Image: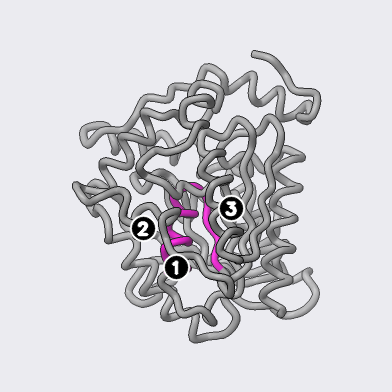
Amino acid sequence: MTTDAYMSAQAQALLAQMSGADLCPATVATVDQHREQARAAFLPRAELAVARYGVSVHPVQIAGQPCLEIRPPSTVQGSPEGTVLYCYGGGYISGSAREDLIVSASLCAHANARVVAIDYPLAPEHPWPAAHEAAWAVFEAVSEEGPLALAGESAGGNLALTVMLRAPRDRVKAALLLSPWCDLTHGGDSLTFNDGRDPTLGRAQLIAAASLYAGGADTADPRISPINGAFYPDGPPVMITTGTRDILMSQCIDLARRMSAAGQDVQLSVYDGLWHVFEFYDELPEADASLKAGGAFLRAHLRS
């Protein structure tokens, strides 16, 4: 492994620890084991994030869907600016709103916003469009309550995008997408170049998860691969983050290019040497900087 002078010492040390990670793809037979391994790795860190950022977390039902409602710490000045509908990642086959508190708790505090994190149903038990329809039902409910932004990481970025593209143009104030998995046809050079360089995600994993999620539907459909959607000049402002080791870096860059070509306001932040959703390792200086910037972005647009 070579290190990068632009990476923090903490990121370089963590990368060295993760380089031997098992990146075996999930199958129908192994998906439960895959989910359990993720829960064991991330739930303790999620609880630490809740304590670190001082947010409150409550299970709620919205539009018949299980969600977590996350509120900013009482030490933050002023009432919450609005609501962020947050979509967790995990390839649509694993993960949960609680595991993603590592990211959503930070965004809640930095944006000074109420966060509604949906626990959407997972494939292969619930293939497309189950997750989208669940997220859409929650979106319709919470968008009636005041200013609303969208956020999500990886598959959650995909889900947030599909909601944004379906929503009336005046209902979404902004969208924050962390390494969004926006092309399930597996386009882009980084899916080959960064396969093996990204310590958290591999091409075989993506191919397996896409098959389980699509359930036989056309993966080029913009409701599954929202990079193929129709972007428009008066769409909501979008911030996209990625890293040069991110296996989805090419998709993130192409998404930003397509939005920009359509006249949509888009910011793309590429972190040198970092990997897929590096923000999930919030102890890193780069992750802290990205989450603070993302929170400030959401806060500014919820206020506008």
Assess whether mark 2 and mark 3 are in contact (beta carbons under 8 angstroms).
no
* Local SS, label 1: helix
Label of residue 213 in the image: none
Residue situated in front as seen by the camera: 146 or 105:
146
The part of the image, by quadrant, that contains residue 223 is bottom left
Name the residue type under label 1: Leu
Distance between the alpha carbons at the discs numbered 2 and 1? 9 Å
| Residue beneath the point at 71% across and 80% down | 304
Name the residue type under label 2: Pro
Name the residue type under label 3: Ala
Q: Which residue is mark 2?
A: 222
Q: Is residue 263 above or below residue 53?
A: below
| Residue beneath the point at 51% across and 78% down | 169
Range shown magenta = 150-165
* Mark 2 neighbour class, 10 Å CA radius: few under 14, some 14 to 19, many 20 or more: some
- Can I make out residue 101 in this image? no
The part of the image, by quadrant, that contains residue 77 is bottom right
Q: Which residue is mark 3?
A: 256
Distance between the alpha carbons at the discs numbered 3 and 2? 16 Å
Quadrant containing the N terminus is top right
Main secondary structure found in the magenta portion = helix
Assess whether mark 1 and mark 2 are in contact (beta carbons under 8 angstroms).
yes
Residue situated in front as seen by the camera: 248 or 68:
248
Q: Which residue is mark 1?
A: 165
